[in-house]
Image (spheres, grey):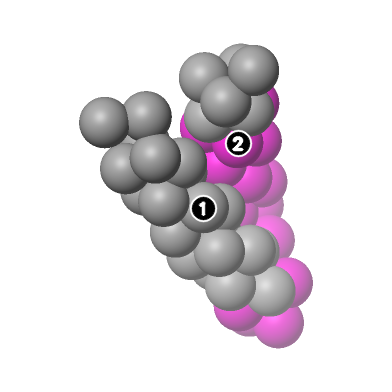
Amino acid sequence: MIQETINDFTQINDELMDALKEADDVTADVIVGIQASLQKHVWMLKALLM
């Protein structure tokens, strides 16, 4: 279950990278904030699995 959540967060992060390419400055800033949060959650979940 935790690995599935990691996979989902990683996929969302990858899709946000695609959206970032087409975003204006304000939207890009919001996307970067969301990505940072997702990356932090992925890191914490991976640490939990160790």
Label 2 or label 1, whichever comes before in sequence order: 2
Name the residue type under label 2.
Phe
Q: Please, what is the dominant secondary structure of the magenta stretch? A: helix
Left or right of 40 on screen, residue 8: right
Depicted 18 relative to depicted 31: above or below: above
Assess whether residue 9 is covered by the magenta stretch. yes
The residue tagged 2 is 9
Question: Depth-wise, is mark 2 or mark 1 nearer the camera?
Answer: 1
Please name the residue shown 63% across and 63% down the image: 34
Q: Where is residue 33 in the image (x, y as percent from the top left)?
A: 58, 72
Q: For the N terminus, which image quadrant?
A: top right
Q: What stretch is highlighted in magenta?
A: 8-29
Q: Quadrant of the C terminus?
A: top left
Marks 2 and 1 in Cβ contact (< 8 Å):
yes
Q: What's the CA distance linking mark 2 and mark 1?
A: 8 Å
Three-letter amino acid code of the residue under disc 1: His
In terms of secondary structure, where does tag 2 sit?
Answer: helix
Instruction: Please give the residue where the numbered disc 1 appears in the rendered image.
Output: 41
30 up-or-down from 3: above or below: below
Rate crowding at label 1 as few (under 14), some (14 to 19) or many (20 or more) other CA atoms within 10 Å: some
Residue 15 has which mark?
Answer: none
Whether residue 15 appears in this view of the structure is no
Identify the residue at image location x=70%, y=82%.
26
Of 19 and 35, nearer the camera is 35
**Residue at the (41%, 51%) spot, across then down:** 44
Tell me the SS state at disc 1. Answer: helix
